[in-house]
């Protein structure tokens, strides 16, 4: 197998098109084998749990990863279909050496990926991913010609339902409030939440109605879930008061977005505000500090400041939010996209199911609906434009792009923000602009996006 020179790891593990490198049967087997050899450096008989989402390709990728691990002397447990944070919980609670998730999160069903957690339940730091990547490339380079004979089989692994049940039991144990009076509309995105959400809501006595909870391998994230929160919001509105709130999970349920009782979408910024105020009122928000990312709206920063709470910003990606939380001692952090991390619940990554429980807990204890709890969050107009690019050249190395960014920041003069970055999982440049007026916001975003498209876009002349 020819050595590939591009990086494997993005901001959230390895991701690509299922069936294409690095997600072919042969390469996933070798990735598993390389991971096994890396784990064996610190434990003679490593133990790993593997979970997956509902994509058509997730089962065979999980099988090939498991076969590669087993060939390196690793003991492998299977959690079957389970959320990403469920695997993180199992890795740390069972004192395993690692947890692996086969999922491409919010991507289309044709994509897939491999997310990795250490035995502590944390995503791997960049330096460790780089070292593992070197090991993977070494195995790819040295693969023998008989590799095909060792793949395309399905190992028999212990685990499955008992592991998922243990995770749900832990989730439910995080809330002591009686939530049985709530009526909730839940969109499972035809993804991993379909395996745990019904059990969790039933255990809490919540009257839940489920949408998009019949995965067929190809309908994950298909016009549903956290990518389309308006689906639940509209259904909540049309129900004429039948629901107290709506919840939308993404494909692997590491994030959640909400609809209030009036059908208004509430994103991660609103949830951070709600949770931060509640935790501060109970004296469990150390240093009155919350960690968000560069994408969180200025309105959140202003609302928190008015409540005496400081907002710190990290790079996009919940692993970077967590790094900042651990560095500063913060116990609450998250992203506008709905990744929320509750360190006071001992969570080590964003967890959509836990977030849903925590939001419902605040609603019941406060006796106030979601709309009232975040009513003073005044959101600055914000737009995000995605531009497909040929290559991810640093913006500062393209003078025309850097000039466009600098010009927009001067024009805003502190009354707005510009964030231009590359996606960690796709060949996209993302342009985010916030401004006091929609007209200025759109004009500045269009100007920067056009400049990027002209210089790096896939349709630009080279």
Image (cartoon, rainbow, N blue to C red):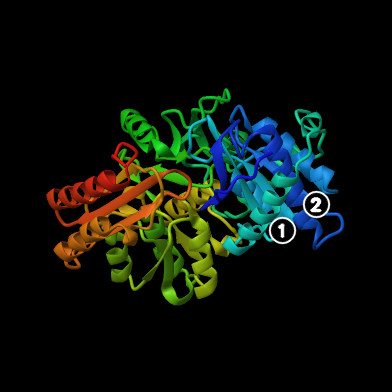
Other residues around mark 2 within 10 Å, as few (<14) / some (14–19) / many (≥20)? many
The residue to which callout 1 is attached is 119
Residue toward you, 30 or 5? 5
In the displayed structure, does residue 274 sit left or right of residue 1? left
The residue to which callout 2 is attached is 47
Query: Could you tell me if residue 460 is visible in this image?
Result: yes
Question: Percent from the top left, x then y, of residue 400?
Answer: 23, 56
Helix, strand or loop status at disc 1: loop
- Residue shown at 61% from the left, 30% from the top: 19
Helix, strand or loop status at disc 2: strand
Q: Residue furthest bottom?
A: 287
- Residue shown at 21% from the left, 57% from the top: 404
Disc marking residue 437: none
In the displayed structure, does residue 387 sit left or right of residue 340? left
In the displayed structure, does residue 364 sit left or right of residue 119? left
Query: Could you tell me if residue 281 is visible in this image?
Result: no
Residue toward you, 205 or 245? 245
Q: Residue furthest front?
A: 462
Question: Percent from the top left, x then y, of residue 284?
Answer: 50, 70
Other residues around mark 1 within 10 Å, as few (<14) / some (14–19) / many (≥20)? many
Residue toward you, 132 or 107? 132
Q: Which residue lies furthest to the top in this view?
A: 216
Question: Percent from the top left, x then y, of residue 29?
Answer: 73, 39
In primary-sequence order, the first of circles 1 and 2 is 2
- Image quadrant holding the N terminus, namely top right
Q: Quadrant of residue 18?
A: top right
């Amino acid at each position: 197998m020819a050595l590939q020179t591009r990086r494997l790891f993005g901001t959230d593990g390895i991701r690509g098109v299922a069936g294409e490198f690095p997600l072919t049967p042969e390469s996933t087997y070798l990735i598993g084998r390389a991971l096994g050899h890396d784990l064996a450096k610190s434990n003679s008989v490593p133990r790993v749990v593997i979970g997956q989402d509902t994509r058509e390709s997730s089962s065979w990728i999980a099988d090939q990863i498991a076969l590669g691990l087993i060939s390196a002397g690793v003991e492998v447990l299977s959690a079957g279909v389970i959320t990403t944070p469920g695997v993180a919980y199992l890795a740390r609670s069972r004192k395993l050496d690692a947890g692996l998730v086969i999922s491409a999160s919010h991507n289309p069903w044709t994509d897939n990926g491999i997310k990795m957690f250490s035995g502590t339940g944390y995503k791997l730091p960049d330096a460790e991913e780089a070292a593992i990547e070197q090991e993977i490339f070494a195995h790819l380079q040295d693969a023998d010609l008989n590799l095909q004979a060792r793949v395309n089989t399905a190992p028999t692994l212990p685990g499955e339902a008992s592991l998922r049940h243990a995770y749900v039991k832990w989730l439910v144990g995080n809330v002591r409030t009686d939530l049985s009076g709530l009526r909730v509309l839940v969109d499972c995105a035809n993804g991993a939440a379909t395996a745990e959400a019904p059990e969790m809501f039933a255990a809490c006595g919540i009257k839940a109605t489920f949408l998009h909870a019949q995965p067929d391998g190809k309908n994950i994230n298909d016009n549903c879930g956290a990518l389309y929160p308006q689906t639940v919001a509209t259904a909540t509105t049309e129900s004429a008061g039948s629901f107290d709130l709506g919840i939308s999970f993404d494909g692997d349920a590491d994030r959640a977005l909400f609809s209030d009782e009036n059908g208004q979408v509430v994103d991660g910024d609103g949830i951070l505000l709600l949770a931060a105020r509640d935790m501060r009122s109970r004296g469990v928000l150390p240093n009155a500090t919350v960690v968000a990312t560069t994408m969180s709206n200025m309105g959140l920063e202003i609302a928190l400041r008015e409540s005496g709470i400081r907002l710190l910003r990290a790079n996009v990606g919940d692993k970077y939010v967590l790094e900042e939380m651990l560095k500063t001692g913060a116990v609450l952090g998250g992203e506008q996209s709905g990744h929320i991390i509750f360190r006071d619940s001992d969570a080590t990554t964003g967890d959509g199911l836990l977030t849903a429980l925590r939001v419902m807990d605040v609603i019941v204890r406060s006796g106030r609906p979601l709309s009232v709890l975040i009513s003073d969050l005044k959101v600055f107009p914000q737009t995000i434009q995605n531009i497909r690019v040929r290559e991810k050249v640093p913006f500062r190395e393209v003078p025309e792009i850097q000039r466009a960014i600098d010009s927009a920041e001067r024009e805003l003069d502190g009354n707005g923000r510009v964030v231009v970055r590359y996606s960690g999982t796709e060949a996209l440049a993302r342009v985010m602009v916030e401004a006091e007026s929609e007209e200025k916001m759109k004009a500045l975003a269009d100007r920067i996006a056009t400049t990027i498209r002209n210089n790096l876009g896939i349709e630009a002349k080279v």
